Image: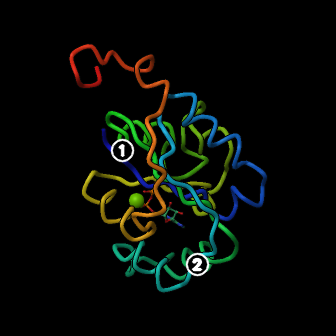
């Protein structure tokens, strides 16, 4: 199964949207394998958004991401990265399609509620950045055999 790193940003926490957002991933069939609420340090946030360092919004992005608690989650499922990015929607709330998380809950291109890894490679780096191995709960999600056809040994 594939994994992705999700961050519920400070606006999602402050606006009371944690439950509504997490519900969408659960209902879709992605399994929560690790989750915690933390306040990010500037250093960790800068590393996470290093590819945007030269962009004009970099400083305000780091200020925003460190302005309050966030919720970090690791989601697991077949094609977890692509499926999550589709549920999340386009970067700016005013452009994101209705039905997506950003399209339904936000207006802003900066305060856009949620981060999701954009490839399997970045998911691995981001999961290792934010979670220690012992923070994962080892369990077999009970609904897996109903969410997927597992008769061939791998999810279909
Ligand atoms: P993504 O989160 O959809 O992958 P990226 O382009 O990787 O979008 O940008 C990272 C984050 O930086 C966005 O989620 C958003 O919070 C912020 N951001 C992106 N573009 C802008 C902008 O034009 N103005 C202000 N903030 C932006
Ligand atoms: Mg991105």
Using the rendered view, name the quadrant where residue 82 is placed.
Answer: top left
The 10 Å Cα crowd at callout 2, few under 14, some 14 to 19, many 20 or more, is few
User: In this picture, is 13 found above or below 2?
Assistant: below
Q: Position of residue 153 (x, y in %)?
A: 22, 22
Q: Position of residue 142 (x, y in %)?
A: 49, 27
User: In this picture, is 115 found above or below 52?
Assistant: above
The 10 Å Cα crowd at callout 1, few under 14, some 14 to 19, many 20 or more, is many
Q: CA distance from mark 2 to mark 1?
A: 26 Å
Q: Is residue 120 left or right of residue 135?
A: left
N-terminal of the two: label 2 or label 1? Answer: 2
User: In this picture, is 79 found above or below 27?
Assistant: below
Q: Position of residue 107 (x, y in %)?
A: 67, 50
Question: Who is closer to the viewer here, 27 or 139?
Answer: 139
Write down which quadrant ligand 2 falls in: bottom left
Using the rendered view, name the quadrant where residue 105 is placed.
Answer: top right
- In the rendered structure, find residue 101 and report the number of the disc placed on it: none
Q: Which residue is mark 1?
A: 81
User: In this picture, is 56 found above or below 94?
Assistant: below
Query: How many labels sit on residues?
Result: 2
Quadrant where the image shows the C terminus = top left
Q: Which residue is mark 2?
A: 60
Within 8 Å of ligand 1, the CB of disc 2? Answer: yes
Of all residues, the one furthest to the bottom in this rendering is: 43
Q: Position of residue 134 (x, y in %)?
A: 44, 64
Quadrant where the image shows the N terminus = top left
Looking at the image, which residue is at 57% across and 28% down? 27
């Amino acid at each position: 199964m594939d994994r992705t790193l999700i961050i519920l940003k400070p606006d999602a926490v402050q606006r009371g949207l944690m439950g509504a957002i997490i519900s969408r991933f659960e209902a879709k069939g992605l399994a929560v394998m690790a989750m915690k609420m933390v306040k990010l340090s500037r250093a960790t946030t800068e590393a996470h958004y290093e590819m945007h360092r030269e962009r004009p919004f970099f400083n305000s992005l780091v200020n925003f991401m460190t302005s309050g608690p966030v919720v970090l989650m690791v989601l697991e499922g077949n094609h977890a990265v692509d499926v999550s990015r589709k549920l999340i929607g386009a970067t700016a709330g005013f452009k994101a399609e209705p039905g997506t998380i950003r399209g339904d809950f936000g207006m802003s291109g900066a305060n856009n509620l949620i981060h999701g890894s954009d490839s399997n490679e970045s998911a691995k780096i981001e999961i290792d950045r934010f979670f220690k191995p012992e923070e994962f709960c080892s369990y077999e999600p009970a609904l897996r055999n109903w969410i997927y056809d597992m008769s061939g040994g791998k999810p279909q």
